[in-house]
Amino acid sequence: MGVRSEEKAEHLMHSAKASMAIEGLSLNQAQENLVKKCLTGRISHNEFLKRALELSRHA
């Protein structure tokens, strides 16, 4: 996954959240922040998976 600017990440998140809303799904703030960190390269994909698993265990 390539590194993206904050602006590009916001655009991608907006599109993804709209698609999810159609399916009746949503992200909470912690989930959204985690995805943005991965999209902008602040964390690796492996770190993303680790943290996503942690979030799912505490849901």
Image (tube, rainbow, N blue to C red):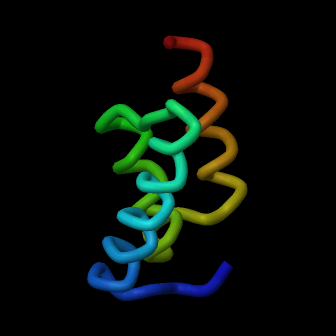
Judge whether 36 appears above or below 40 on screen.
above
Residue at position x 43%, y 55% in the image: 18
In front: 57, or 26?
26
Give left or right: position of 8 versus 55.
Answer: left
Report x, y in % for residue 58.
51, 12
- Label tally: 0
Direction from residue 45 to residue 6 in the image, left or right: left
Which residue appears at 35% of the width and 50% of the height? 33
Q: Is residue 31 above or below residue 36?
A: above
Residue at 37% x, 84% y: name it: 8
Spot occupied by residue 31 in the image (x, y as percentages of width and height):
43, 39
Going 66% across and 40% down the picture, which residue do you hit?
Answer: 50
**Residue 7 image position (x, y, % from top left):** 28, 83
Is 16 or 51 nearer to us in this picture? 16
Which image quadrant is residue 4 in? bottom left
Which of 11/5 is in front? Answer: 11
Quarter of the picture holding the N terminus: bottom right
Q: Residue furthest top?
A: 58
Which one is in front, 44 or 22? 22
